[in-house]
Image: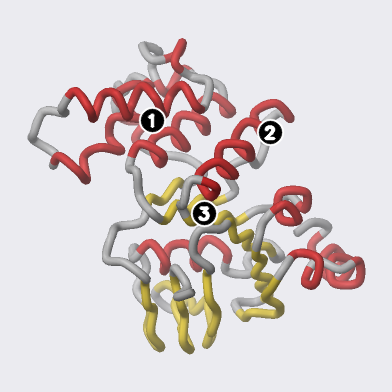
C-alpha cells in the first residue's frame, strides 16, 4: 500500500534555524501515526512540512493524494483578535470547499453541526471562542479540523493540558477518523496515546531515531532514554 506521506532526505526549519535534518520516513495511510520526542526535537516542524506551511529546503515530500491536509494547531490566534463563536470557528473548516466569500450550503452546515456534536461542544455553538476554557477551545479546533473532511488530519499535541475526559473524547474521535478511512498524524507527549497508535515516529534533535509499531519502538529502554533527556516524551 502506498504511504499517505513519504519523506526522502527532507531538511527544513526557519531562517537561521535549521530543525529537521535529512529525514527519510513514511506515514502509513488509513492509520494513526504518533510523533514523539523531546521538546525541540522537531515534532511541530514535521507537521508543518507535511501540511505544506513550512517548505522543505532539501529532499522531497510525496503525498498519496493532492487533497489539502487539515492542520489542527495547539492554539489559534484568531480567538484572541476576532469575535468568533464556536460555530463560526468550526465553519471555517468548510472554507476550503466553498471559498471565503461563498455562502455555506445546507450540507456544509450539517458537517459543522456533526463535527461539533462529535466533540461534545454543540451546546457551546453560540459562545465566543475566546470565552471558552482551554479544553473547550481545543475541542472546537479539533472540530474545525474534522469539518474539513480531509483525508489527512494533522494535530499538534491536541490533548496537552486537558482533563482526562477531554483527552479520552479526542482520542476516541481520532480513532474513529482512522477507522473511517482517514489518516491521522499527531504530535504527542502522551505515551498512552502513542502506544494506542498504529505507527510511531521518534524524533530527537531533528533526526529520526526510530520508526515502526509502538510495541517495537516504545520499549522501556527507549522511553527511559527520552525521559532522561526531557522528563517526558
Q: Is residue 45 above or below residue 140?
A: below
The CA span between labels 3 and 1 is: 27 Å
Q: Residues within 10 Å of mark 1 (few under 14, many from 20)?
A: few
From the image, tell me which residue sits under label 1: 80
194 and 40: which one is in front? Answer: 194
Which of pointers 3 and 1 indicates the residue nearer the eye?
A: 3
In the rendered image, residue 47, in percent from the top left (x then y), is placed at: 48, 62
Q: CA distance from mark 2 to mark 3?
A: 16 Å
Query: Is the residue 31 above or below the residue 120 in the image?
Result: below
Question: For the residue labelled by badge 3, is the local secondary structure a helix, a strand or a loop?
Answer: strand
Q: Are marks 3 and 1 in contact (CB under 8 Å)?
A: no
Q: Residue visible at 49% across and 27% down?
A: 118
Mark 3 nearby-residue class (10 Å; few <14, some 14–19, many ≥20): many
State which tag comes first along the sequence, 1 or 2. Answer: 1
Q: Earlier in the sequence, mark 2 or mark 3?
A: 2
Q: Quadrant of residue 4?
A: bottom left
What is the spatial separation of the Cα atoms under label 1 and label 2, in whole angstroms? 27 Å
At x 84%, y 72%, the residue is: 222
Q: Which residue is mark 2?
A: 168
Q: Secondary structure at mark 2?
A: helix
| Residue 184's disc number | 3
Task: From the viewer's perspective, tell me whether residue 143 is left or right of residue 52.
Answer: right
Where is residue 157? Give x, y as percent: 59, 48
Would residue 189 be found to the left or right of residue 222 on screen?
left
Tag 2: Cα neighbours inside 10 Å, few (<14), some, or many (≥20)?
some
Q: Count the marks.
A: 3
Residue 25 picture location, percent across and down = 55, 79
Q: Nearer the viewer, residue 227 or 150?
A: 150
Percent coordinates x, y for residue 91 in the rendering: 28, 30
Q: Are marks 1 and 2 in contact (CB under 8 Å)?
A: no
Q: Which quadrant does the C terminus fall into? A: bottom right
Residue found farthest to the left: 102
Amino acid at each position: 500500500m502506498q504511504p499517505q506521506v513519504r519523506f526522502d532526505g527532507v531538511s527544513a526549519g526557519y531562517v537561521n534555524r535549521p530543525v529537521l535534518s535529512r529525514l527519510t520516513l513514511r506515514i502509513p495511510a488509513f492509520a494513526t501515526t504518533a510523533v514523539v520526542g523531546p521538546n525541540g526535537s522537531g515534532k511541530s516542524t514535521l507537521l508543518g512540512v507535511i501540511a505544506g506551511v513550512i517548505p522543505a529546503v532539501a529532499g522531497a515530500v510525496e503525498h498519496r493524494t493532492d487533497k489539502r491536509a487539515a492542520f489542527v494547531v495547539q492554539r489559534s490566534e484568531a480567538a484572541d483578535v476576532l469575535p468568533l463563536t464556536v460555530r463560526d470557528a468550526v465553519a471555517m473548516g468548510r472554507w476550503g470547499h466553498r471559498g471565503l466569500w461563498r455562502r455555506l450550503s445546507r450540507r456544509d452546515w450539517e458537517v459543522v453541526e456533526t463535527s461539533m456534536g462529535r466533540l461534545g461542544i454543540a451546546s457551546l455553538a453560540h459562545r465566543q471562542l475566546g470565552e471558552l476554557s482551554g479544553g473547550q477551545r481545543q475541542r472546537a479546533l479539533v472540530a474545525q479540523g474534522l469539518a474539513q473532511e480531509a483525508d489527512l488530519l494533522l494535530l499538534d499535541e491536541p490533548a496537552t493540558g486537558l482533563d482526562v475526559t477531554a483527552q479520552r473524547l479526542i482520542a476516541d474521535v481520532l480513532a474513529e477518523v482512522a477507522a473511517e478511512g482517514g489518516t491521522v498524524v499527531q504530535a504527542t507527549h502522551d505515551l498512552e496515546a502513542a502506544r494506542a497508535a498504529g505507527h510511531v515516529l521518534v524524533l530527537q534533535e531533528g533526526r529520526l531515531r526510530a520508526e515502526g509499531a509502538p510495541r517495537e519502538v516504545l520499549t522501556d529502554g527507549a522511553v527511559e532514554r527520552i525521559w532522561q533527556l526531557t522528563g517526558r516524551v
